[in-house]
Image (spheres, helix red, strand yellow):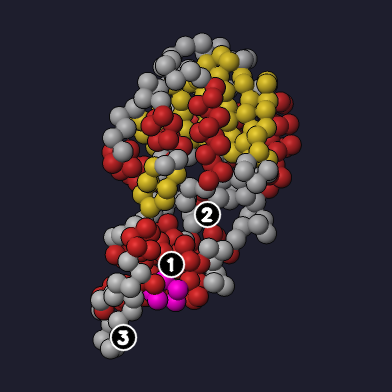
Amino acid sequence: MVSNAIQSPQTIVFALQNGAHRLAELSDSPLIDSEILLGHCLQATRSYLHAWPERLLNAEEQDNFEQLLMRRLQGEPIAYIIGYKEFWSLRLKVTPVTLIPRPETEMLVERVLELFAADTPRIIADLGTGSGTIALAIAKERPLWQVFATDFSADILAVARENAQSLALPNVFFFQGFWCNALPRQGFDAIISNPPYIAKDDIELEKYVSQFEPLTALIAKNEGIQDIQQILDEAKDSLKSGGYLLLEHGYQQAQAVRNRLSQAGYEQINLYQDLAGLDRVTEGRYVGCKVTSG
């Protein structure tokens, strides 16, 4: 809706600089935020904004940009404002019912791609898929693999299915339910999950994250470890012999996750760091189960 107030025409460069100035205290990247929001209003790329800095915005464009700026100034994440997030070069729809994908989660994708040859069919499960982040990235890279993606919420799965359809990925299959109980079969080559792993009173849970993102995808009981424990226990009955379990976790949980995997009978336990050098993904192999094939 266009404001009734008389507005002086703004150029693209003025709008960008003004937006960045107002966002400076909130965002670590105020100019990028301003560019993304204005680009969304104009349905234009950031390169277009820089190529046409003196282009005048009309009143409706200025009003729309102002509304988006106000939402961002209240702490709402950029991804929810524009409705999508880039992950693994894929544009994924996100909504307030889904967690916003983080760059560090790409480690799970990288590692599972390294485990198996691309030309060999595999069966993979992604537990707690959210917007489909992990499952869709794997399916895109490995068209011969079958990827089973689960989540407890029908609303969340609807977003993931929409992303799969928009990306034309027919090798992803969605199932509703909690963790491994949602899987319709056994004999998985690998089970992957980025489960909730933040303790309820963790001071690292940022104010605006807890205000806008779904807490069910972030917070777990028992100091953040309960869902991880449930997954590693249940996965033993769903993996084929020698199958892998890969879990994302908090950097301070690495030793606890390793200990629990070892106690549960997993072997070849490896830890991987994210780009910031923080312990982020632990992998274990389970050879004690009886499942040998699909």
Mark 3 is on which residue type?
A: Ser
Callouts 3 and 1 close, C-beta under 8 Å: no
Q: CA distance from mark 3 to mark 1?
A: 19 Å
Q: Secondary structure at mark 1?
A: helix
Q: Considering the image in quadrants, where does the N terminus appear? A: bottom left
Say which mark, if any, is on residue 75: none
Can residue 15 be found in the magenta stretch?
A: yes
Toward which corner of the image does residue 174 lie, by quadrant? top left
Q: Identify the residue under disc 3.
A: 8
Q: Which residues are magenta?
A: 14-18
Q: CA distance from mark 2 to mark 3?
A: 42 Å
Who's the residue at 30% across and 81% down the image?
A: 9
Q: Identify the residue under disc 2.
A: 215
Can residue 156 be found in the magenta stretch?
A: no
Q: Tell me, yes or no, if residue 251 can be seen here.
A: yes
Q: Nearer the viewer, residue 145 or 149?
A: 145
Who's the residue at 68% across and 35% down the image?
A: 257
List x then y, in percent, for residue 119. Answer: 42, 16
Q: Nearer the viewer, residue 136 or 277?
A: 277
Who's the residue at 72% across and 26% down the image?
A: 263
Mark 1: few/some/many CA within 10 Å (<14, 14-19, 20+) = many
